[in-house]
Image (tube, rainbow, N blue to C red):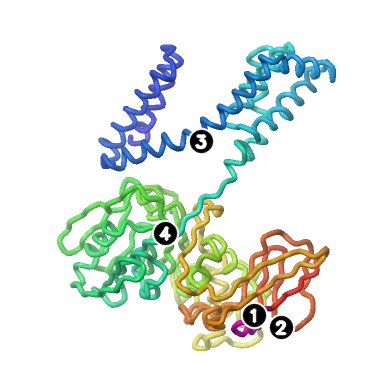
Amino acid sequence: MLALIAFVPLIVTIYLMIGRDWGASKALPLAWALTAVVALVFWKMNVIDAIAFTLTGFLSALETLIIVFGAILIMNTMSRSGAMSAINGMFMGVTTDARIQAIIVGWAFGAFIEGAAGFGTPAALAAPLLISLGFPPLAAATICLIYNCTPVIFGAVGTPTNTAFTVVKDAVATIMELNSAKWFDNYAWIDDHTKGLWGKKRGFDGEIVTGMVAPEEVLPKFTELYAEFDPDLVVTAAHATQQNLEMPYSLGNLKPRNGKLYAEDRFNGKTWDLKESGKRRVYTAVGNCLIGDMNNTKESMAAAWMNGSNAATMIGYVVTTWHGRNGWGALKYWVSNPERYTLAEAVYINQQDLVNQHNEWTPTLLDERYNFCDEFMEELTTAANRVSEVVGRDVDLDNAQDWDMIGFWHDRDVVVYYGDPKWEVRLQSAGEQDYTASAKRKGKRYIVTITTGENFSMEKMRGDKFKQEHVLDLPFSYIFPERLNSPKLVGDKWGKAVVDENFMLLYDAEFAPSSTYEIVIKTK
């Protein structure tokens, strides 16, 4: 029903402009008014947010109008100066074959205009040219619109390829691992492990204040902090399924309803919706079972986080998790490289590191599907038996590496990344950036230069033991700014290393403070 209501402004606009022949100056203000009514009455948006989005829309439209204005100005200038007639004559002189004319004007010329202007101007300019060449109006319009499908992603002076950039400044979490709060201007957390322990800070250098609430108050406290801090980032790790996030375990729930999140208090039966502002968020469910699984329904936690809570990027497990290497590893790479790696890059390089170590231990299993089942001990026993066959000995689940061999296999393909990886989401630096890495090409050699500061620490580069029970020390990692052709590391002084066309991992690297190092890579 809500989806149908959302279509009302569009339907009314189409009816007025086509059925009643209204101009845009009359129809669009009415469409805006209807949109505002729908947002305020049916979607429960507050008035201030509605005004803010209206102003944002006007300001965003200015950029488009300027680009389109330039394109129309060019067309009118060409028409009045006689250049358009000259172009027509040129096209007629090239060929009289209508098929070739369609390709030249509809695709080649249209692609040029798409790059220069975009926003519909290719069809507006190319179609009249085709009509002047003898094409029927409907055919001219159809040709231009179909042919414009190819270049449109590069159009509007590259506008579609522009990348949004976000620095995470405000966060709310249910984990203890981020409780130094050093990356955030404002941060709040409530620990689901020690029931009732919570804390918060205001200001980048603000004091961290902690407190305790009763177990039955954990869920209300989380929703209170969520509303107060309106976070850019939410991080959770607790017992969960596709339909709930327990907070704390067995005592309260976040649940989906009509594509939104609501809180359900098991003590008194009360329910209430999470307060949302419409802010675009990042949600990383680093240790929650199944929360990334859509479960083929809109009534899933993943759908509710992305729809109701506006999580433009979400990371979560699609199976029951018990090892945590993939989820926690992505977070470790991200927090260990603030400003340096976007969240998508951290997820990517963590996956490459995981797969490389998986390949080193059990290469045979890279081509085998892990045996997931509902019974944990049955699943673990089956996996342990298969790993034992591969390595030629009985694995010991009390041995850390044996446990990791099974865990890495389990975690290899079970974390999903929802959202646009081109959205550059980064953490603020809190002094971790004690080295720089840059690259330059010299002929067929690609040189990566690492310069360390006087406060450089290898321990910090390796992740400061963040979640060490799940994630090993991080290697030095670097994502190349360009794709390399058949790269090969020159020399053997870097020990164990992986060099791919897109990235490099150095596992044995040892850097000293106040030093400069050059890593030479040979390419074709």
Residue on which the image places disc 4: 283
Q: Quadrant of residue 29?
A: top left
10 Å crowding of disc 1: few (<14), some (14-19), many (20+): some
Image location of residue 92, percent across then percent down: 81, 15
- Of 70 and 486, the residue lying toward us: 70
**Badge 1 or badge 4: first in the primary sequence:** 4
Check contact, mark 2 vs mark 1: CB within 8 A.
yes
Residue pictured at 58% horizontal, 67% vertical = 351
Q: Nearer the viewer, mark 3 or mark 4?
A: 3
Estimate the spatial distance between the alpha carbons at disc 3 and disc 4, rounded to whole Å: 30 Å
Residue 495 - label = 2
Q: Nearer the viewer, mark 3 or mark 2?
A: 3
Estimate the spatial distance between the alpha carbons at disc 1 and disc 4, rounded to whole Å: 30 Å
Q: Quadrant of the N terminus?
A: top left
Q: Which residues are magenta?
A: 509-516
Q: Quadrant of the C terminus?
A: bottom right
| Amino acid type, mark 1 | Tyr
Residue on which the image places disc 3: 63
Would residue 262 appear left or right of 26 to someone viewing this image?
Answer: left
Would residue 311 appear left or right of 83 to someone viewing this image?
Answer: left
Majority secondary structure of the magenta segment? loop
10 Å crowding of disc 2: few (<14), some (14-19), many (20+): few
Estimate the spatial distance between the alpha carbons at disc 2 and disc 1, rounded to whole Å: 7 Å
Q: Secondary structure at mark 1?
A: loop
